[in-house]
Image (cartoon, rainbow, N blue to C red):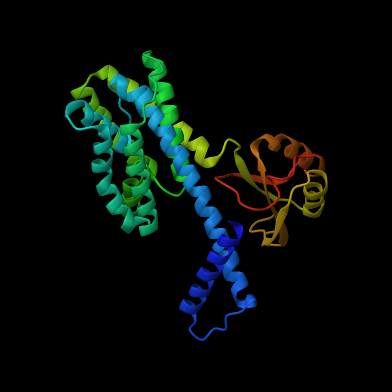
Amino acid sequence: MKQFLGKLITNIAQKRLKTENQNATVSDITLAPIIDNIKVEVSHAIKEFIFIIIGVFSAGFGLNGFLLPNNFIDGGATGISLLLQNTTSLSLSALLLIVNIPFLILATRTIGVKFAIKSVLAIAFLAVVVHFVDYPIITDDKLLIAVFGGFFLGLGIGMAMRGGSVIDGTEVLAIFLSRKLSITVGDVLLLTNIVIFSFGAYILSIEVALYAILTYLAAAKTVDFVVDGVEEYVGITIISEKHEELRVMITDKLQRACTIYVGKGGFNEKGSSESKDIIYTVMTRLELAKLYTEVDKIDKNAFVVIGLVKDLKGGMIKRKPLK
């Protein structure tokens, strides 16, 4: 099997090389970087589809095991589908496809064709899972339904996003409108869900709408944890006259990497600017207390700026524990 895959990747690399340059000489040296790129693409694609599959089954569990049997709704395109399912004779699986079609068409213009295709496959797979997989009904307690239905639905949405797709198309609409109007993605999602919950209160009941808000909050928080990670990373910028001592402390004592920027102060007591090194490093929020202690030992007047980091790739922060 391994030999077959190796031969297949080599053939694809040869075709790609010929497509890029008709006069290129096919050899092990010219094929090596292309083969490496294909292996990376394949490994990433497999990982992304695993994320999507896990996400679809999790979202299906949230819908069939909690929300759907109890006539609950959620926000976004899923909430619209659940609302229509409660007021029409159409099945939820069909509504998930119908409601998301306009958002997926918009995704081809806003994000890209590849993203739209993966999203179509993810939503179609979710529709199949919701229709055919017989999940057990876990509870009839309304609070548990709202919280855990939102949790599993949010887990599914977050995992699908980690896989480079969506199973709820309103995020695409939010991105599109945020580029056209002077509002954030979060504001668009909030306004969209206010409209959905208002219809839910009118068509079903105010109680259902209030539980739907709780479901939405649980789902949104879970999506944040899945997409951004449980660990919250922060970027730290330090400006100090004792920058070299601070650099040594960060690299030797805390065992963290850092980057040194050459900067120039814009204000001092003498009225003139002077050159100084600026330190930038990344840590988890749990490590900040230790950093503050060590910085104060060296320079209590150091200027420290903290900024939230959404995600990390590469480097050593995820491989080395704090000393």
Q: Position of residue 192 (x, y in %)?
A: 29, 37
Measuring 80% from the left and 39% from the top, which residue is drawn there?
323
Residue found at the far left of this picture: 88
Tell me, yes or no, if residue 268 can be seen here.
yes
Q: Position of residue 73 (x, y in %)?
A: 30, 27
Q: Examine the image and state in which quarter residue 318 appears.
A: top right
Q: Is residue 44 above or below residue 155?
A: below
Between 35 and 102, the residue placed more toward the observer is: 35
Using residue 262 as the reference point, say whether residue 97 is left or right of it.
Answer: left
Between 206 and 121, the residue placed more toward the observer is: 121
Measuring 72% from the left and 59% from the top, which residue is drawn there?
276
**How many numbered tags mark residues here?**
0
Between 168 and 253, the residue placed more toward the observer is: 168
Q: Is residue 231 above or below residue 261?
A: above
Q: Position of residue 277 (x, y in %)?
A: 72, 58
Q: Is residue 82 above or below residue 270?
A: above
Residue found at the far top of this picture: 141
Q: Is residue 229 above or below residue 269?
A: above
Q: Examine the image and state in which quarter residue 160 appears.
A: top left
Tell me, yes or no, if residue 213 can be seen here.
no
Q: Examine the image and state in which quarter residue 179 appears.
A: bottom left
Between 127 and 66, the residue placed more toward the observer is: 127
Q: Quarter of the image containing the N terminus?
A: bottom right
Using residue 294 as the reference point, say whether residue 208 is left or right of it.
Answer: left
